[in-house]
Amino acid sequence: MMNAATSNSEKRNFASPNVMEIYFLGTGTAVPVENHSPAGLFVVTPQLRLLMDIGPGSLSRLNHIGFSVDQIDYLFLSHLHPDHTLDLITLLQVFNSAPETVRQKKFTIIGCRGCNEFLLHIYDLYPDVFPSGYSLEIREVYRDEFLLGDLRVQSGPTAHTESSVAFRLEEGGHSLVYSGDASQQGELTRLASGADLLVSECSFPAGWQTEDHLNADEVGLIAQASNVKSLVVTHLYPPALRVDLLSQIHQHYQGKAQIAVDGLRLSLE
Ligand SMILES: [Zn+2]
Ligand SMILES: [Zn+2]
């Protein structure tokens, strides 16, 4: 069952047994729009805290919901565009040099192909962020499946870029799929099959011509074909916010659908 999570301002930790909490840190694109910041999704399981994409401002908004940067166990990167990655530089700086948050335990990035090379470019630009007191592991994925403790992780290509991936997380009978940025040439329908919750990009309104994103028609068709129990749309460009996006999606998809705003919190329990 999907519920709105309870509001809480104290320092937060892991989720209760059999619960997966989902916090929408950023539900927009690179275009500045109120309540729709660049991409970031924070997922808390009973054992792990995962940041999925790290667009500019993600770390401030993570702090705002009561988590600190040292609580992030894994960073997932769907692809390497700036609206999904810019705060990675900030994170590395904080891990190296900020009082009280210097990182000592290993940090792992699970991301699309090209992450290793991307990090090397960041170190060229900002030599001071090269990990000094901790080890950084980078695991590049494409069409993969593995366990992180009790959490089953799957990835699959989304054809937004050559290497872009979506992620599926499953634990305790709950399943969440995050599209990252996607196009209809990707494998999102397969990856999302039967999921409790699909968090999908919906960059544009119905009828909008796009090769490397999804419009409302395509999102509705994917949600229907994959038979997900519920859909939340994110990564909304301004034209998508000017129309009745849910009606457009419901032309194709009969399940529950919702438009994400920054600060939205949901839980699978
Ligand atoms: Zn994007
Ligand atoms: Zn992108």
Image (tube, helix red, strand yellow):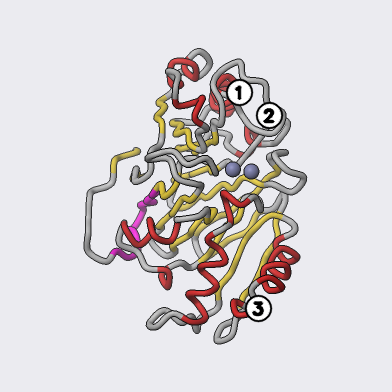
State the residue position of label 1: 218
| Farthest-out residue, top | 251
Measure how far apart labels 3 and 2 are at the Cα level. Answer: 38 Å
Measure how far apart labels 1 and 3 are at the Cα level. Answer: 42 Å
Secondary structure beneath label 1:
helix
Secondary structure beneath label 2:
loop
Which tag is nearer the camera, tag 1 or tag 3?
Answer: 3
| Relative image position of residue 166 (x, y in whole percent) | 62, 45
Secondary structure beneath label 3:
helix
Amino acid at the residue labelled 2: Gln
- Identity of the residue drawn at 45% across and 46% down: 26
Q: Is residue 107 above or below residue 60?
A: below
Magenta region includes residue 173 = no
Q: Where does the magenta region start and end?
A: 12-23
| Relative image position of residue 118 (x, y in whole percent) | 71, 63
- Foreground residue among 146 and 44: 44
State the residue position of label 2: 184
**Does residue 269 appear anywhere in the picture?**
no
State the residue position of label 3: 127
Amino acid at the residue labelled 1: Glu
Which tag is nearer the camera, tag 3 or tag 2?
Answer: 3
